[in-house]
Image: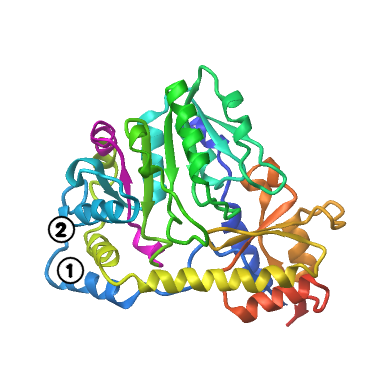
Amino acid sequence: MQKFAKRLSLLKPSESMAMSQKVRELRKTMDIVDLTIGQPDFDTPEHIKQAAWRAISDGKNSYTASYGIPELREAIASFYKQYYRANYVPLKEVLVCPGAKQGIMYLMQAFLSPGDEVVLFEPCWLSYADMIFLNEGVPRFIPALENMAPDLKQLESAINCKTKMILLNNPVNPSGYVFRREELAYIVEIAKKHDLLIISDEIYDRITFTEFHSLSQFESARDRSIVVAGFSKNYAMTGWRIAYILAAEEMISRIGLIHQHTATCAASASQYAALAAITGEQSCVDIMCRTYRERRDLLMPLLANSKFKAIMPEGTFYLMLDCAGVDRNTATPAEFLLNKFGIASVDGIFYGASSAQYVRLSLTCGENVLRKAAARLCGGEEKASL
């Protein structure tokens, strides 16, 4: 039998998926508070669903233009001009793809040669390293500061002759950190100095509780900057698998070749749903963002009474909890929370060595669930057997 490619041996199973499976089993005998979920607990807004139904009913069910329907690409470019004063040529600098993860994979395939290095700031989304490995690249991690903020002072020292790009997540999954404009400007300056690409994964760009700046706003770096964003988080459309890539025409034309030979195009109905999302009423986004902020503001003071230190998120719907001050024996932080308190979380080690003593908690659940979790962590309630 033919052996698998060696690169597969470098991949790790998704920890959040593994924890979800464990939770399903434990729920047969225990009352588990599940704070692992990495997707909105809202349904897709009705006007978006109706747009998809209309498209299907009107027979728009075949292949579309590979880069996406022109109306959607024009709407995305218009959105960036309105929100970020960024100018993209709709039919040349916008590529619609089936999910932001797919888009980032395209970029790794397009730009990485064997041995090329990608600079990442810890903590960072766990799939980045595996996508780099799959394309024979090497992730180079910059350890986080004590509060899980990126340590930009270490950026230039992490760059060498093999460095090809800097990959950002803004806001950051799992910490909720939002990059300041001056921080992005510094990264752009270093990228220019060393002739590097910059990729900014901005999938949570509308779920922010402070001022947000997009890499798209740095016009002077357009020849080396790529923005990946989409509809999954902002519009509760995770299952629709629809996102986009913004870059200079030369880069989009090459990335588009990979897209053509991989997916052909994004799903037609999803594109029309995305068009309704980005051009329609935006109050649904505001409501979801406000809800996540209210949940954060509920949980933070409750956790102040526990032995755990919470990092205040500035965006996303996650919160990192420092478990360093708790005696866990040999258990990982997530194992400890699950076994002692019946709280399911994701171990921080999967987001980088800097966050090994942390867990990621998700705010995609109701107020009562968050209060129950806080009560357990503060010693007011232990886990319960069914």
For marks 1 and 2, the one nearer the N-term is 1
Give the alpha-carbon distance from disc 1 to disc 2, as whole Å. 11 Å
Of residues 350 and 95, the one drawn nearer to the viewer in this rendering: 95
Q: Is residue 246 magenta?
A: yes
Q: Quadrant of residue 246?
A: top left
Q: Quadrant of residue 69?
A: bottom left
Q: Measured from the top left, where is residue 45 in percent x and y?
A: 35, 74
Image point (41%, 35%), residue name: 108
Q: Is residue 91 magenta?
A: no
Q: Measured from the top left, where is residue 123 in percent x and y?
A: 61, 45
Residue at the spot of label 2: 62
Is residue 136 visible in this depiction of the protein? no
Query: Are there few (<14), some (14-19), or many (20+) residues within 10 Å of tag 2?
Result: few
- Give amino acid for label 1: Ala
Q: Do labels 1 and 2 touch, CB within 8 Å? A: no
Counting every numbered tag in the picture gives: 2
- Give amino acid for label 2: Ser
Q: Which residues are magenta?
A: 236-256
Which residue is the extreme one toward the top? 161
Is residue 108 visible in this depiction of the protein? yes
Q: Determine whether 356 is above or below 385 in the image.
A: above
Quadrant of the drawing holding the C terminus: bottom right
Query: Are there few (<14), some (14-19), or many (20+) residues within 10 Å of tag 1?
Result: some
Badge 1 marks a residue whose secondary structure is helix
Residue at the spot of label 1: 55
Image point (40%, 61%), residue name: 232
Please state if 20 lies on the left or on the right of 227 as rendered.
Answer: right
Which of discs 1 and 2 lies nearer the camera? The answer is 1
Badge 2 marks a residue whose secondary structure is loop
Q: Measured from the top left, where is residue 27 in percent x and y?
A: 66, 74
